[in-house]
Image (tube, rainbow, N blue to C red):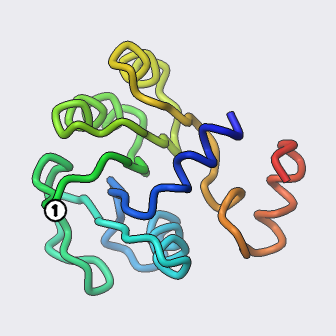
Amino acid sequence: MVSIIRDFLGQQRLAMVGVSHEPKHFSRIVFRAFRERNFDVTPVNPAMGEVDGAPCYSRVQDIQPPVDTALLMTPAAVTDEVVKDCVDAGIRRVWMYRRSPAAVSFCEAHGMSVIAGECPLMFLPQTGWIHRFHGWLHGVR
């Protein structure tokens, strides 16, 4: 799993699906954490036009130029549908913050690299002590 995570984080450009309109929501914290580490993060939320000054797209298929990596911060029920959009958009790497067994199976059946159920903040460099500790507990730090 660690090698898949390293590959994912080695991609500097990615979509983040399910970024909340609420500035203090966890998805916005993750969005800002990636941007602070110089990732080119494209937000996706059909109910928003922009997030923290970045243009926001309704679907991953709409992103131009296309991305091949996506972080899904969506509820599991929505994730099941979003992964279908990811396949249509040509995305090859998917990180699901909230695990969905059906979505994991779908991605694997379509040859996608999948990370399911892990918190991205445990793996980003220079995160807070609680995230580093959480990563240590999971045996990834």
From the viewer's perspective, is residue 117 above or below residue 100? below
State the image coordinates of residue 125 (x, y, percent, origin top left).
70, 69
Q: Nearer the viewer, residue 109 or 53?
A: 109
Q: Give left or right: position of 63 versus 96.
A: left
Q: Is residue 119 left or right of residue 63?
A: right
Residue 14: image quadrant is bottom left
Q: Residue 23 at what x, y percent from top left?
A: 41, 79
Answer with left or right where residue 67 lies relative to residue 106. Answer: left
What residue sits 37% from the left and 48% below the top? 70
Assign a secondary structure to mark 1.
loop
Q: Residues within 10 Å of mark 1 (few under 14, many from 20)?
A: many
In the image, taking residue 117 as reference, residue 101 lies left or right, namely: left
Q: Residue furthest bottom?
A: 53
User: Horizontal and vertical percent for residue 120?
Assistant: 60, 55
Q: How many marks?
A: 1
Quadrant in the picture for the N terminus: top right
Q: Quadrant of residue 54?
A: bottom left
| Residue at image location 67% in from the left, 39% down from the top | 3
x, y percentage for residue 45?
A: 23, 59
Residue closer to the observer: 107 or 48: 107
Residue 101 sits above or below residue 91 on the image: above
Q: Is residue 64 above or below residue 92?
A: below
Q: Amino acid type of disc 1?
A: Tyr
Say which residue label 1 marks. 57
Residue at 63% x, 51% y: name it.
Answer: 119
- At horizontal 18% and vertical 40% (from top left) the residue drawn is 89
